[in-house]
Image (tube, rainbow, N blue to C red):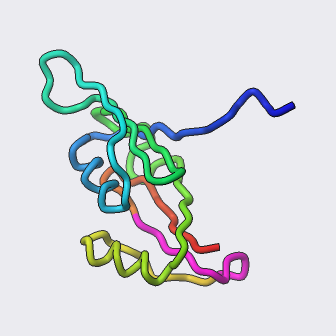
Amino acid sequence: MAGPIRSLVPLADVRDMLASIAFYEKLGFSVSNSVTAEGEQVPNWCWLTSEKAGLMLATRSDPACGGRQGVLFYTYCDDIETTHALFAERGIAVSDINRPFYNPGGEFEICDPDGYVIWVAQI
């Protein structure tokens, strides 16, 4: 019998929902669902998806951990060099591609507008 948990989707607190949505759109995500409070113009919550990946964002005036957040997101791509170049072209600050012993396919780091660390890896 499978466990009772069938999926896990991170929920990240963000200060500026529109800036966060724009950032994640550069990574290939799109808004699948959102909730906007009555009388507001900007969503307070949204669900972003990209193929099998999902991420929820919720507006918060101050981040839970300040500075670098207490969680990082590890993502996977098919071609590390192409993905690295694409993100750089889109104006995303990318680290150098590293090829540590545990991941010869390579990986690099980016950060979102709220300081969440996103590792992009090819395995």
State the image coordinates of residue 108 (x, y, percent, origin top left). 49, 74
Is 28 magenta? The answer is no
Q: Which residues are magenta?
A: 100-110
Residue at 79%, 31% in the rendered image:
3
Residue at 32%, 72% in the rendered image:
93
Q: Would residue 117 appear left or right of 92 to someone viewing this image? A: right
State the image coordinates of residue 87 (x, y, percent, origin top left). 34, 72
Q: Is residue 56 above or below residue 24?
A: above
State the image coordinates of residue 13 (x, y, percent, origin top left). 39, 37
Q: Is residue 94 above or below residue 98?
A: above
Q: Is residue 110 above or below residue 103?
A: above
Residue situated furthest right in the rendering: 1
Q: Would residue 39 appear left or right of 106 to someone viewing this image? A: left
- Quadrant housing residue 15: top left
State the image coordinates of residue 107 (x, y, percent, origin top left). 55, 75
Residue at 51%, 79% in the rendered image:
80
Image quadrant occupied by the N terminus: top right
Instruction: Give the main secondary structure of the magenta stretch.
Output: loop
